């Protein structure tokens, strides 16, 4: 039987964490951000983990963190853009509940990531775009890089049960949209069985 969680997947900058938080709040569910859990457990930022030990090491930590989610109920879970690509991770995530692919247009993702340089610096796979000198150059390159990334991961992302492709104005509005889509399609687990959580949780 499918679990009672909602799992948000999609590329970096798609809004999984901010949308997920609102979605959890509006449904009275707990919220987990997988990357935050990794950072708290390792006491290092994602950028530092990539820099010090490389991507393969990060992927191993990410997979171990996904395993820790097994048996979790009644949570919205935002996972890093690469987490759903691995088949073993996917099997666990899918068993946890309804998977939702947040897929705003690549140029919109680029715009949002460039609006906050700190946010972009947190993403080691994209941060080098800041080496470009002008804002239009950065936006163009970042849009290309995000498009390529989505293209490479399309097979994995397409496995999600629902896709939300709006170029959202606010995380609240996207959270509302997801809730409405899942309700309409009968994909929300019985809401009365849910407990309320009011803080992020590290397991
Ligand atoms: C990654 C996405 C990041 C983070 C890491 C790698 C990826 O998470 O896990 O930088 O491979 O797409 P967000 O999608 O939350 O930015």
Image (tube, rainbow, N blue to C red):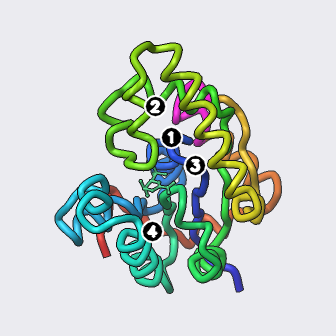
Decide if ligand 1 comes within 8 Å of the CB at mark 4: no
Q: For this view, does 173 lie left or right of residue 166? A: left
Q: CA distance from mark 4 to mark 1?
A: 29 Å
Q: CA distance from mark 1 to mark 3?
A: 6 Å
Decide if ligand 1 comes within 8 Å of the CB at mark 3: yes
Residue 156 in sight: yes
Q: Earlier in the sequence, mark 3 or mark 2?
A: 3
Within-10-Å neighbours for mark 2: few <14, some 14–19, many 20+: many
Q: Do labels 1 and 3 touch, CB within 8 Å?
A: yes
Q: CA distance from mark 3 to mark 4?
A: 29 Å
Magenta segment boundaries in residue numbering? 168-175
Tell me residue 153's x, y (percent): 68, 58
Vertical comparison of 99 with 114: above or below: below
Q: Which residue is mark 1?
A: 13
Within-10-Å neighbours for mark 4: few <14, some 14–19, many 20+: few
Q: Earlier in the sequence, mark 4 or mark 1?
A: 1
Q: For this view, does 39 lie left or right of residue 140? A: left
Decide if ligand 1 comes within 8 Å of the CB at mark 1: yes
Number of numbered tags placed on the structure image: 4
Q: CA distance from mark 3 to mark 2?
A: 12 Å
Of all residues, the one furthest to the left in this rendering is 43
Where, quadrant-wise, is the C terminus in this rendering?
Answer: bottom left
**Residue 1 sits in quarter:** bottom right
Within-10-Å neighbours for mark 1: few <14, some 14–19, many 20+: many
Q: Do labels 2 and 1 touch, CB within 8 Å?
A: yes
């Amino acid at each position: 039987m499918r679990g009672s969680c909602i799992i948000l997947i999609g590329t970096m900058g798609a809004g999984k964490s901010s949308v997920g938080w609102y979605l959890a709040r509006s449904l009275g569910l707990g919220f987990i951000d997988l990357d935050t859990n990794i950072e708290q457990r390792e006491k290092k930022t994602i950028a530092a983990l990539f820099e010090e030990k490389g991507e393969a090491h990060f992927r191993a930590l990410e997979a171990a963190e996904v395993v820790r989610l097994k048996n979790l109920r009644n949570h919205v879970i935002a996972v890093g853009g690469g987490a759903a690509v691995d088949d073993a991770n996917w099997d666990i995530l899918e068993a946890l509940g309804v998977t939702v692919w947040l897929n705003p247009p690549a140029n919109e993702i680029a715009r949002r990531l460039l609006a906050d340089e700190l946010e972009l610096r947190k993403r080691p796979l994209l941060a080098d775009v800041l080496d470009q000198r002008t804002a239009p150059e950065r936006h163009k390159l970042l849009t290309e890089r995000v498009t390529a990334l989505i293209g490479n991961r399309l097979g994995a992302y397409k496995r999600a049960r629902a896709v939300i492709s709006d170029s959202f104005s606010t995380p609240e509005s996207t959270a509302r949209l997801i809730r409405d889509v899942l309700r309409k399609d009968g994909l929300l687990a019985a809401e009365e069985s849910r407990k309320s959580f009011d803080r992020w949780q590290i397991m």
